[in-house]
Image: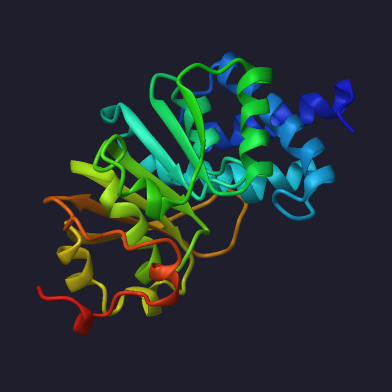
Amino acid sequence: MFNEQNQDKLKFKITKGLNQLGLPDNQEVIERLYEYLVLLYEENQKYNLIGPAEPEEIITKHFYDSMAPLKNIELLNHNKGLDLGTGAGLPGVVWKLIYPEISFYFLDSRKKRINFLKMVKNKIKIDKFYPVKERAERLGQQQDWREQFSFVSARAVASMDILIEYVLPLIEIGGYAYLFKGPDYKDEISDMNGIVSFLGGGMINIINIKVPDLERERYLIKIKKIKNTPEKYPRRVGKPKKYPLKKEDISI
């Protein structure tokens, strides 16, 4: 699978995506993304971390998809980020390997995913890389974590009405939420402005993302944190998912 010929082909594909998106493509970035690809493919065979996928598919559907929004984000303006519901580390590990200067935290509630990320950290020898096994609702109520991050990213985690309650309590004032969405975002976002404002967010910015070699519609939802989130939020574990916030539930 990862013989010399195939290795060159896969590294070329990684480099192609970085070039097309205008992202750093030095040899260290390419090598580290390739090492992550190998680990992700091999461990996915054992633990089904991302569903069935061959290495080239992983690059297109997961690496390119994770990279594409970086063209629209000044990530180096941030110093401390959290990838919420990170799963196998997407987009967070890809972002971290491209911009190693940033301190990155990887939040997931499942042990097998956090164990995989610890392996990635140790095998690739990545600094400022912190896997965290916890629920977003609990983390958002802990003073050492609440409103401590200059950005929070989330890809394929939950619908907007649930996700926004997980994300905004963790972001510092002046920081940003970067949320990956498909075309269904239009249904999810139609009634969200008041709730976003109530939880401390500013205007919702929607950016159409072009992913190399993918036809699917992709969007980045970008929200700036402009005021503190009310102390009550996030609510206890399970409640945001079971009872998503609606306009009538809050006083704006």
Residues 74 and 87: in front is 87
Quarter residue 205 falls in: bottom left
In the picture provided, is 155 more to the left or to the right than 59? Answer: left
User: Is residue 21 visible from the viewing direction of this image?
Assistant: no
The x and y percentages for residue 157 are: 50, 59
In the picture provided, is 32 more to the left or to the right than 38? Answer: left
The residue at 38%/77% (across/down) is 243
In the picture provided, is 166 more to the left or to the right than 1? Answer: left
The x and y percentages for residue 69 are: 42, 46
The residue at 67%/29% (across/down) is 36
Q: Is residue 31 above or below residue 202?
A: above
Callout count: 0
The x and y percentages for residue 235 are: 32, 63
Q: In this view, does 252 lie above or below 12?
A: below
Quarter residue 64 falls in: top right
Residues 11 and 130: in front is 130
The residue at 78%/30% (across/down) is 9
User: Is residue 249 visible from the viewing direction of this image?
Assistant: yes
Residues 94 and 238: in front is 238
The x and y percentages for residue 238 are: 45, 66
In the picture provided, is 64 more to the left or to the right than 210? Answer: right
The residue at 64%/19% (across/down) is 122
Quarter residue 125 falls in: top right
Residues 43 and 219: in front is 43
The structure's colour scheme is rainbow
